[in-house]
Amino acid sequence: MFNKRFAIEGRYIGEGEKPYIIAEMSANHGNNLENAIKIVHAAKQAGADALKIQTYTADTLTLDCKTEAFEAKGAWEGQYLYDLYLDASMPWEWTPILQQEAKKIGITLFSSPFDRSSIEFLESLDMPAYKIASPEIIDLPFVRRVAQTGKPIILSTGNATIAQINEACSVMLQEGAKDLAILKCTSEYPAPPKDIHLKTIPHLKEIFKCPVGLSDHTLGTAIPIASVALGASIIEKHFLLDTTIQTADSFFSATPKELQEIVEGSQMVFDALGYINYPITPKKPQRSLIATRDIDQGEPFVDGYNIKSLRPGGGIEPKYLDLVAGRTATKKLPKGTLLSWDMIGGYEH
């Protein structure tokens, strides 16, 4: 079984812990190291717990082949996969530079490897955790090698079936991995809200008994914030400096302002969830039986004529109306009196 709670660089994730927010740099570095460094700082300033990069080259992901099978689909239609990945990839030599920058300002930096060579490179830098992207979930030898590192693993589901998710988890367990989080992910860019299916989050949590979160590709902040109410422990969001920088991922990435809204909003929802709570003792009632006009001693109480259920509370509760109506006042009661039992006499003869 996986742990329901684990830590990445001292920050606990999972049951009882506030949501862990990951800013995903992806291609938003724009092939500019200075921009990449600025993204690390902007993620920290927005309140993110971690900044995630991707470690691949065009050659580790695909072939430079210009046939129909290698054409990009969806938002990147019209490009070939090799050219797309060539432009979007981050030079590996930037990784230690960004690591040092992240350490200096106090934000966790980790990466998504995509093949064995990237795993070995990242292991040489002692990455604190690994993210397995959803297309790699079916590459079980790759999943096995990630699990063998002994590092915490975050796994995106994407288009994977429940059987494929289970196969990947089984391989991890075989290798002794205990620290796993699964992210519900919809592989559309941007993803329409109707395709997100947040109710999958508690279902994954029930099946795999580990922290579950959301890798979000929707526009705006509402969906990731709402996911916390369904039990999301982690939110991953693509992140860019500003919308003037055009990259392969910029059209569905969050701005610093949006990321800050996600950080603050998810914390607010987490605080509001609390726990199952019913007051042990009843709170002061908000309504009571009140004299709506001056009532003489001996005058009978008549609902709607001289008494009524109104605010404020503090007098006889409205549920006792049938026990009060028809009985007489023991003394003169001015308009606005909150009835109490010592004012209630016997029935009129």
Image: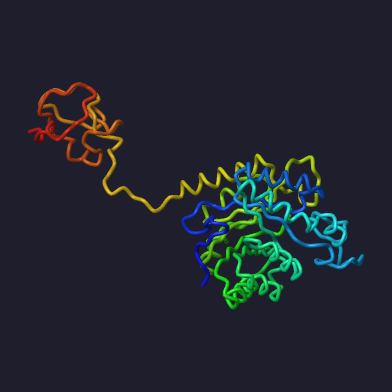
Q: Residue furthest left?
A: 349
> Relative to 252, is 54 above or below?
below
Residue 282's spot in the image, x, y percent?
A: 27, 44
Say left or right for 83 vs 154.
Answer: right
Question: What is the quadrant of residue 26 in the picture?
Answer: bottom right
Residue appearing at x 60%, y 44% in the figure: 47
Residue 22's spot in the image, x, y percent?
A: 63, 52
Q: How is the image coloured?
A: rainbow
Say left or right for 235 vs 330.
Answer: right
Residue appearing at x 57%, y 66% in the figure: 180
Question: What is the quadrant of residue 165 in the picture?
Answer: bottom right
Quadrant of the drawing holding the C terminus:
top left
Q: Residue furthest right?
A: 66
Q: Residue furthest bottom?
A: 174
Say left or right for 68 vs 46.
Answer: right
Residue 109's spot in the image, x, y percent?
A: 66, 54
Across the whole image, how many numbered discs are drawn on residues? Answer: 0
Question: What is the quadrant of residue 176 in the picture?
Answer: bottom right
Q: Nearer the viewer, residue 147 or 326?
A: 147
Residue appearing at x 70%, y 48% in the figure: 239
Residue 78's spot in the image, x, y percent?
A: 88, 56
> Relative to 147, is 78 above or below?
above
> Relative to 84, is 168 above or below?
below
Residue appearing at x 65%, y 42% in the figure: 258
Q: Nearer the viewer, residue 266 or 72?
A: 266
